[in-house]
């Protein structure tokens, strides 16, 4: 049976997911429906992906087995209130909107199967990380199809909804921190005379390699760090500067700040 998926919103995150789904061939372009707010985005999505894109959300909902809500969080309530009669009972709905809870979604769409997802933009290259939460039990829900959707663009973790703030901080926002780290590492190399293009390659490839070792070796990150750190050598010289300038505590505090902001947004304080 042909599977169809619809996106309400076709911006940065929806485009990252669509790019990943097409590369993985989980969906064919003609089976992906998207609605956006501007004609410019309709044209971009058709040109970039060859998918169906329109200003009309009604048709997206009616044509899709799974509907992904990918508009900005502040728009979700108004949009779903306007469109609620288009959804079929039992239709699978996945919201990627930060700070919109399962409870809020269930109140807006009481007859649908509701999931909450926190993906990240590396989904566009098949290296995404998505946290998923639902109030549905395994037997009443469609966990498998939701898992399959996000597995097509990277790794998946099912978590309890209260951990979504941590998920947002550690993998929703973190590509930005990692891009900053790559930029800073490359700047350091450029300071030492390395050409810019080679500096970016070296910094980015080192991050990929180190991350892959963490995932594949089963060793503690500290043990892997020790393997690179010879007594009196270059690495320990760098590490002592990182410790003195608060590298680790800065990252821990940044993750905590992102989670705090997420809690405030969910509580409607912002
Ligand atoms: N960016 C990330 O890294 C990331 C990570 C995890 C989760 N998220 C979540 O993903 C959601 C989208 O974020 P984003 O960064 O992709 O935002 P974005 O780039 O601003 O995209 C928002 C999209 O919504 C469309 N839109 C606006 N009004 C609409 C309407 N009435 N009907 C249908 N579509 C409408 C916009 O259309 P136009 O293009 O025509 O303006 C745009 O395509 C947010 O809820 C965010 O919390 C984002």
Image (cartoon, rainbow, N blue to C red):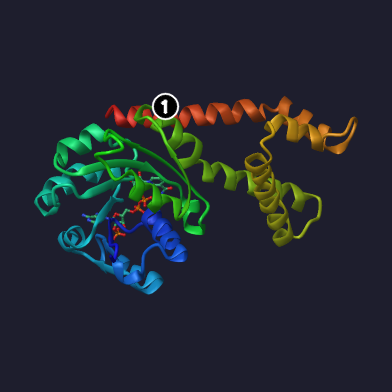
The answer to whether the beta carbon of the residue marked 1 is less than 8 Å from any atom of ligand 1 is: no
43 versus 113 height, above or below: below
Q: Quadrant where the N terminus lies?
A: bottom left
32 versus 103 height, above or below: below
Near-viewer residue (172 or 23): 23
Q: Position of residue 156 (x, y in %)?
A: 45, 43
Residue 196 placement, left or right of 88: right
Q: For mark 1, does the 10 Å Cα neighbourhood hold few (<14), some (14 to 19), or many (20 or more) residues? A: some
Number of labels in the image equals 1
Q: Residue at x 16, y 60 (%)?
A: 62
Residue 14 found in image quarter: bottom left
Residue 201 found in image quarter: bottom right
Tag 1, which secondary structure? helix
Q: Residue at x 69, y 53 (%)?
A: 205
Q: Position of residue 20 (x, y in %)?
A: 45, 60
Where is mark 1, residue-wise? Answer: 260
Q: Position of residue 112 (x, y in %)?
A: 18, 44
- Residue reaching furthest to the left: 85
Near-viewer residue (72 or 21): 21
Residue 237 placement, left or right of 5: right
Q: Residue at x 36, y 69 (%)?
A: 28
Q: Look at the image and tell me whether residue 270 can be seen.
A: no
Q: Residue at x 40, y 33 (%)?
A: 159
- Residue reaching furthest to the front: 139
Q: Look at the image and tell me whether residue 6 can be seen.
A: yes
Near-viewer residue (68 or 178): 68
């Amino acid at each position: 049976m042909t599977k169809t998926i619809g996106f309400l919103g076709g911006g940065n995150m929806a485009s990252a997911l669509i790019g990943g789904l097409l590369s993985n061939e989980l969906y064919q372009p003609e089976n992906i429906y998207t609605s956006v707010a501007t004609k410019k985005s309709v044209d971009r999505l058709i040109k970039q992906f060859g998918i169906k894109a329109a200003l009309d959300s009604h048709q997206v909902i009616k044509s899709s087995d799974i509907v992904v809500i990918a508009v900005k969080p502040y728009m979700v309530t108004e949009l779903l209130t306007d469109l609620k009669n288009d959804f079929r009972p039992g239709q699978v709905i996945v919201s990627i909107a930060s700070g919109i809870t399962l409870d809020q979604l269930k109140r807006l769409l009481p007859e649908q199967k509701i999931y909450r997802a926190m993906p990240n933009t590396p989904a566009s290259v098949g290296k995404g990380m998505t946290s998923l939460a639902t109030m549905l039990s395994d037997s009443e829900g469609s966990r498998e199809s939701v898992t399959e959707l996000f597995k097509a663009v990277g790794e998946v973790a099912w978590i309890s909804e209260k951990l979504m703030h941590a998920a947002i901080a550690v993998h929703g926002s973190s590509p930005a921190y990692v891009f900053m780290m790559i930029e800073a590492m490359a700047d350091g190399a450029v300071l030492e005379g390395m050409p810019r293009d080679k500096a970016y390659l070296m910094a980015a490839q080192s991050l990929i390699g180190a991350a892959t070792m963490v995932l594949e070796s089963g060793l503690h990150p500290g043990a892997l760090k020790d393997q690179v750190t010879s007594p009196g050598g270059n690495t320990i010289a760098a590490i002592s500067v990182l410790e003195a300038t608060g590298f680790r505590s800065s990252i821990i505090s940044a993750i905590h700040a992102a989670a705090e902001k997420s809690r405030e947004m969910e509580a409607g304080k912002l």
